[in-house]
């Protein structure tokens, strides 16, 4: 799919107070490693069939971070208006009608997330009416941390389908460096989070869904 804009960002739009409240709430909740929604493990019942040490080590080569899930209305109220604006301003105009839980992520020293897409090969097959038959269309990432609190951890994009005759170069999303900034992008766009080399970076991710593209 050719796009005029592969991402759209807003700088310093989420108040610092709200960012701090999300971080505080995230620390309050029990923190756990993300082992459930990456690649081949996305549909696996990890409680009944836990990962082996080898599988965990292999997974951490791709992604190493700590996450928890949030579903508080006050968080969506702050962020979703910018998703709607980006969808319009970037010219995507995707049909979006629901969102998944918010993913609060903590990247500590050397933690990272290698190149990936947020969407799956097939629509969700789920009894939840808000997910069933839908696909991820727009992803949003909010930077909750002050840039002075960490080093590294840059969000990069790779527009792999831009031109197959040219070698793609990663594009750093400088626009979300300031605390309270966010970026919205189609969920099929390749992206990564580089390793944090100092301090801790907190972020919040929400996936916005709709029925498959026609």
Image (tube, rainbow, N blue to C red):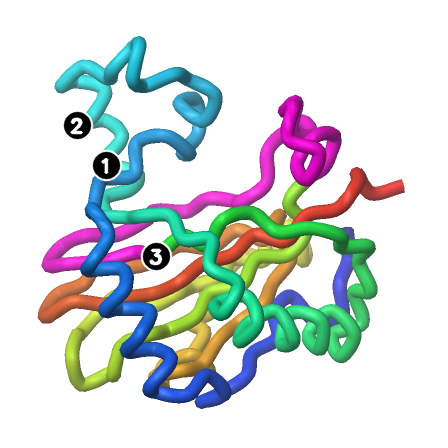
Q: Which residues are magenta?
A: 105-134
The local secondary structure at tag 2 comes to: helix
Residue 114 coordinates in the image, percent (x, y): 34, 46
The percent coordinates of residue 81 (x first, y second) are 65, 75
122 is higher (above) or lower (below) than 21: above
Q: Relative to the observer, which residue lies in front, 171 or 144?
A: 144
Mark found first going from the N terminus, 1 or 3: 1
Q: Secondary structure at mark 1?
A: helix
Disc 2 and disc 3: Cα gap in Å?
22 Å
Where is 162 relative to 182, above or below?
above
Where is residue 147? Give x, y as percent: 25, 83
Is the magenta region chiefly helix, strand or loop?
A: loop
Residue drawn at 41 percent across, 47 percent down: 115
Residue for point 39% across, 65% down: 155
Residue 186 spot, x, y in % from top left: 64, 57
Q: Which residue is mark 3?
A: 104
Q: Earlier in the sequence, mark 2 or mark 3?
A: 2
Q: Nearer the viewer, residue 209 or 107?
A: 209
Q: Distance between the Cα atoms at labels 1 and 3?
A: 20 Å
Residue density around tag 3, few if under 14, some if 14–19, many if 20 or more, within 10 Å: many
Residue 165 shows up from this direction:
no
Q: Which mark is residue 61?
A: 1
Please give the name of the residue rendered at 23% of the width and 44% of the height, measured from the top-left corner: 64
> Is the C-beta separation of discs 2 and 3 under 8 Å?
no
Judge from the rendering whether residue 133 lies leftward or rightward of residue 6; answer left or right: right
Determine the secondary structure under disc 3. strand
**Side of 56 relative to 6 (left or right):** left
Asked if residue 131 lies in the magenta stretch, the reply is yes
* Cβ atoms at labels 1 and 2 below 8 Å apart: yes
Frontmost of labels 2 and 3 is 3
Report which residue position mark 2 lands on: 57
């Amino acid at each position: 799919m050719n796009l005029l804009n592969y991402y759209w960002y807003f700088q310093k739009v989420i108040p610092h107070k709200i960012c701090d409240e999300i971080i505080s709430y995230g620390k309050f909740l029990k923190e756990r490693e993300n082992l459930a929604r990456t690649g081949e493990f996305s549909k696996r019942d990890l409680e009944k069939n836990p990962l082996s040490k080898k599988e965990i080590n292999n997974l951490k080569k791709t992604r190493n971070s700590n996450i928890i899930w949030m579903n508080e209305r006050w968080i969506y109220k702050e962020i979703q208006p910018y998703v709607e604006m980006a969808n319009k301003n970037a010219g995507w105009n995707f049909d979006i009608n629901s969102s998944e839980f918010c993913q609060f992520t903590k990247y500590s020293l050397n933690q990272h997330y290698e190149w990936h897409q947020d969407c799956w090969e097939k629509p969700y097959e789920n009894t939840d009416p808000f997910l069933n038959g839908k696909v991820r269309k727009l992803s949003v990432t909010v930077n909750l941390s002050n840039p002075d609190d960490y080093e590294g951890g840059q969000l990069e994009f790779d527009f792999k389908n831009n031109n197959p005759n040219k070698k793609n170069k990663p594009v750093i999303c400088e626009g979300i460096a300031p605390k309270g900034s966010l970026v919205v992008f189609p969920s099929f766009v390749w992206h990564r989070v580089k390793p944090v080399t100092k301090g801790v970076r907190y972020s919040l991710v929400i996936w916005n869904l709709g029925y498959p593209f026609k």
